[in-house]
């Protein structure tokens, strides 16, 4: 999921050329939108979701007493 942050317009207006056209602003918006929306890095896919099969195999084997 991409996160889009907002910046103040005064900071952007000060850094822009005074002769910028509406077309250039729209183009800049869409360029930034696509760069963030289609960023291939998706950190939520890399977060741990709990113990895996190796952890379960180790702890289940040690939690059951041997019945011999």
Image (cartoon, rainbow, N blue to C red):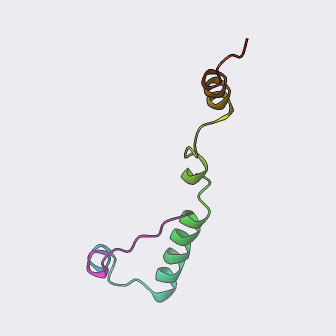
Relative to 35, 18 lies left or right: left
The residue lying furthest to the bottom in this view is 22
Whether 41 is among the magenta residues is no
Measuring from the top left, give residue 42's x and y in whole percent: 58, 53
On the picture, is 5 further left or further right than 12?
Answer: right
Residue placed most toward the observer, 49 or 38: 49
Whole-percent x, y for residue 66 in the image: 68, 16
The residue positioned 64% from the left and 36% from the top of the image is 52
Q: Is residue 24 left or right of residue 40?
A: left
Q: Which residues are magenta?
A: 1-11
Number of numbered discs visible in the structure rendering: 0
Main SS of the magenta part reads loop
**In the depicted view, which residue is nearer to us: 58 or 16?**
58
Residue 2 in the image: above or below residue 26 = above
Q: Is residue 9 magenta?
A: yes
Q: Residue at x 37, y 84 (%)?
A: 19
Q: Nearer the viewer, residue 26 or 60?
A: 60
Q: Quadrant of the N terminus?
A: bottom right
């Amino acid at each position: 999921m991409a996160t889009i942050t907002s910046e103040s317009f005064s900071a952007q207006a000060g850094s822009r050329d005074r002769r910028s056209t509406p077309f250039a602003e729209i183009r800049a918006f869409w360029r930034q939108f696509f760069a963030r929306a289609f960023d291939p890095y998706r950190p939520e896919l890399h977060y741990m979701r709990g113990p895996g099969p190796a952890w379960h195999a180790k702890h289940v084997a040690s939690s059951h007493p041997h019945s011999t």
